[in-house]
């Protein structure tokens, strides 16, 4: 079974943009909000993907993830079935000391939120943290994209 193992962090400065080797424009929606099998459709520049994610372990680091590349036109049609308003963001890909960080800068009703993720081979894997990495939010459900689609960042009492 394919597993996603990752840790999530808030980002405390825009310095990460200077280190990015690639930028992706992402729009994603959720066709199923069932916590045991969330179904996401995503366009990413000129590519598209259908993804099914299972429920996270108790630490929020590991969960089942199945992803398949799909036709861009079909993905745009599937986005019309989204149960929520689609999320828009720019993803910055950053190589840092043997790990790849994906930093998402959100827009629209999630504007102002920037989250970094690092995928790992195992949950206890050591990795060096860049200076722009802030508070860890791994396992905090409100920072999951599916939750941001339902309860946007701008509606939070901060």
Image (cartoon, rainbow, N blue to C red):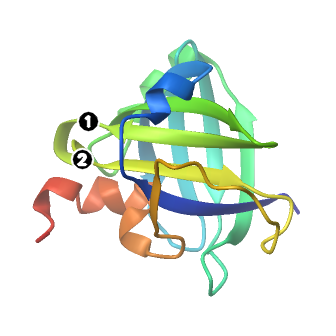
Question: Mark 1 = which residue?
Answer: 107
Q: Element under label 2?
A: helix
- Residue ID at (65%, 68%): 54
Q: Residues within 10 Å of mark 2 (few under 14, many from 20)?
A: many
Quick check: 109 above or below 26?
A: below
Q: Element under label 1?
A: loop
- Residue ID at (37%, 38%): 105
- Res 32 seen here: no
Q: Which quadrant would residue 90 be assigned to in this image? A: top left
Q: Residue furthest bottom?
A: 58
Q: Which mark is residue 158?
A: none
Residue 31 rendering spot, x and y as whole percentages: 46, 49
- In the rendered image, the quadrant that contains the N terminus is bottom right
Report how far apart the C-alphas of labels 1 and 2 lie in the structure: 5 Å
Would you say 20 lies left or right of 82 here? right
- Residue ID at (22%, 56%): 152
Quick check: 141 above or below 92?
A: below
Question: Mark 2 = which residue?
Answer: 110
- Res 12 seen here: yes
Number of callouts in the render?
A: 2
Mark 2 and mark 1 in contact (Cβ < 8 Å)?
Answer: yes
Quick check: 125 above or below 32?
A: below
Residue 146 rendering spot, x and y as whole percentages: 42, 58
Residue 8 rendering spot, x and y as whole percentages: 54, 61
- Residue ID at (12%, 61%): 155
Would you say 111 lies left or right of 29 here? left
Residue 21 rendering spot, x and y as whole percentages: 62, 20
- In the rendered image, the quadrant that contains the C terminus is bottom left
Q: Residues within 10 Å of mark 1 (few under 14, many from 20)?
A: some
Q: Which quadrant would residue 47 be assigned to in this image? A: top right
Quick check: 115 above or below 55?
A: above
């Amino acid at each position: 079974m394919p597993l996603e193992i990752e840790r999530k962090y808030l980002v405390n400065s825009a310095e990460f943009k200077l280190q990015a080797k690639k930028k992706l424009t992402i729009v994603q929606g959720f066709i199923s909000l069932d916590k045991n099998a969330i179904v996401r459709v995503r366009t990413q520049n000129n590519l598209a993907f259908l993804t099914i994610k299972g429920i996270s372990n108790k630490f929020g680091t590991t969960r089942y993830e199945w992803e398949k590349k799909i036709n861009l036109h079909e993905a745009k049609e599937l986005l019309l079935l989204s149960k929520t308003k689609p999320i828009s963001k720019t993803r910055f890909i950053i190589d840092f000391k043997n790990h790849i960080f994906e930093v998402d800068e959100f827009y629209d009703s999630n504007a102002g939120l920037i989250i970094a993720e690092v995928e790992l081979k195992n949950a206890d894997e050591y990795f060096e943290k860049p200076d722009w990495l802030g508070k860890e939010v791994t396992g905090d459900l409100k920072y999951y994209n599916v939750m941001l689609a339902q309860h946007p960042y701008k509606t939070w009492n901060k």
